Amino acid sequence: ATLERADKIILVMQQSVPCVRDAARMKNILTQNLNIQSSRIRLLVNRYQSNAPASLSDIRDTLELEDPILIPNHFASASRSIDTGVPILEGTPGSPISKALKKMEVALDGQMQPHMANIFTRSISTFLRS
């Protein structure tokens, strides 16, 4: 019942041939079994690389969804965020992932929300930098 009531459903996948097949199966379940309109489904490709075996055109052709949201594969900023516990938008705001997340926010919501660091996050960030 939750999926039927959602305005948007984000189908998240990585850029590999098995993931493309799985995403196509999930899209079919959503559209055929649950009667969800394709226009309500957005595709997000996580860890996107332009030189991956499953190309962006392969993904578009297979899934027949509007342009996917691309979150690039940027190990350094993702690893730093995990290791420090600081959200990537705060710890590395200029990283390719942070830029993509900001674009995603606008694509999904139509606007960007202000991101305020709380006192704990600012303290940890300052401590880890010293």
Image: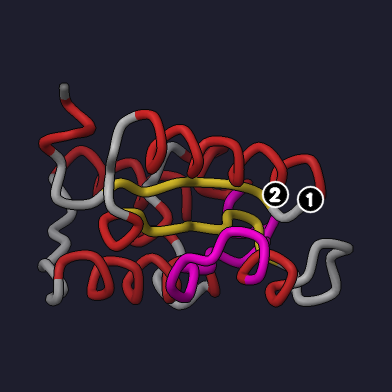
Q: Which disc, if any, is residue 82?
A: none
Q: Secondary structure at mark 1?
A: loop
User: Residue 66 placed where, x, y %?
Assistant: 43, 73
Q: In the image, is residue 123 above or below residue 68? A: above
Mark 2 or 1: in front is 2
Residue nearest the observer in this picture, 83 or 19: 19
Q: What residue appears at the point 66 percent right and 37 percent down from the top-left corner?
A: 22
Q: In the image, is residue 36 above or below residue 66? A: above
Instruction: Measure the C-alpha gap from mark 2 to mark 1.
Output: 6 Å
Task: Identify which amino acid the numbered label 2 is placed on.
Answer: Val
Q: Is residue 104 left or right of residue 71?
A: left
Task: Identify which amino acid the numbered label 1 is placed on.
Answer: Ser
Reading the image, the residue beneath label 1 is 16
Q: Is residue 55 rendered magenta in the image?
A: no
Q: Is residue 59 left or right of residue 51?
A: left
User: Residue 108 placed where, x, y %?
Assistant: 24, 65
Q: In the image, is residue 130 above or below residue 66? A: above
Reading the image, the residue beneath label 2 is 20
Q: What residue appears at the point 84 percent right and 65 percent down from the top-left corner?
A: 52
Residue 74 in view: yes
Please name the colour scheme applied to the rendered image. secondary structure
Residue nearest the observer in this picture, 67 or 49: 67
Q: What residue appears at the point 34 percent right and 54 percent down from the top-left corner?
A: 41
Q: Are marks 2 and 1 in contact (CB under 8 Å)?
A: yes
Q: Which residues are magenta?
A: 61-78
User: Residue 64 placed where, x, y %?
Assistant: 53, 66
Which quadrant of the structure image shows residue 104?
bottom left
Residue nearest the observer in this picture, 28 or 72: 28
Density class for disc 2 (Cα within 10 Å; few <14, some 14-19, many ≥20) is many
